[in-house]
Amino acid sequence: MPLSPPTSRRALKHTRSIQIEAFARDDGLWDIDARITDVKTRDTRLASGVRPAGEALHNLWLRLTVDTQLNVIDAEAASDAVPYPGYCDTIGPAYKKLAGLNLLKGFRDGVKQRLSGINGCTHLSEMAMVLPTAVIQAFAGDVLDTRDGANDEQQTHKPFQLDRCHALRSEGAAVAKYYPRWAVKSQAVSESS
């Protein structure tokens, strides 16, 4: 279901795009390539000069190389368009500090600790924050056994995705319908029975 129609006439002024692609490598690792762009529909006056309408203010890249346990093995960043050339685009090497973090265990806090404020680029660091869930989606069915209800009664471990979001909470209707073995009656339902 899409958003409701706008209640007033609108004019597009700015577009931020984030694109994430996941690649399985021949060596068993994965490369997660992320890109963020900011584009305005009008000429933009910056301290560094005028950026013409339609030309990217930001065109930034971040690649994480991860193993199948979601450990960051390596990281690199590159800047193709920045508001302050020669300044913004020098922070890329700092993103090597992401190596050693785990995407499921404190990754976002690690990004903040290692790359917040003047230690990083606001845009690259914000983009890094969405990578854990993107990698989970990339790994689902390839690296992570999501089972999607298949042979539920024969499984010994709860599927990875359960209790990681509102819809797939153990006491919810979706789990009761699609993963009945793992369904837990909510306390409210149990007490009214």
Image: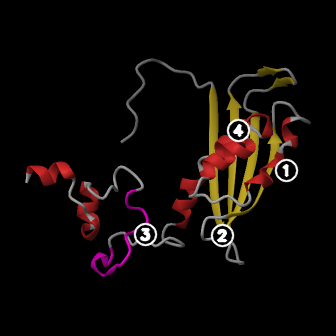
Q: Amino acid at mark 4?
A: His
Calculate the distance from the C-alpha at mark 2 to the C-alpha at mark 4: 25 Å
Question: Quick one: 135 or 48, which is closer to the camera?
Answer: 135
- Residue 86: x and y in percent read 92, 36
Q: Is residue 157 magenta?
A: yes
Q: Quickly name the residue at label 4.
A: 123
Q: Pointer 4 and pointer 1: residues touching (CB < 8 Å)? A: no
Calculate the distance from the C-alpha at mark 4 to the C-alpha at mark 1: 15 Å
Calculate the distance from the C-alpha at mark 1 to the C-alpha at mark 3: 36 Å
N-terminal of the pair, mark 4 or mark 3, is: 4
Look at the numbered disc 4 and give the secondary structure of its residue: helix
Tag in front: 4 or 1: 1
Q: Quadrant of the C terminus?
A: bottom left
Q: Pointer 2 and pointer 3: residues touching (CB < 8 Å)? A: no
Q: Amino acid at mark 2?
A: Asp
Q: Quickly name the residue at label 3.
A: 146
Q: Residue at x 82, y 48 (%)?
A: 94
Q: Quickly name the residue at label 2.
A: 67
How crowded pointer 3 is (Cα within 10 Å; few <14, some 14-19, many 20+) is rated as some
Q: Residue furthest right?
A: 86
N-terminal of the pair, mark 1 or mark 3, is: 1
Calculate the distance from the C-alpha at mark 4 to the C-alpha at mark 3: 32 Å
The colour mode here is secondary structure
Look at the numbered disc 1 and give the secondary structure of its residue: helix
N-terminal of the pair, mark 1 or mark 2, is: 2
Q: Is residue 149 magenta?
A: no
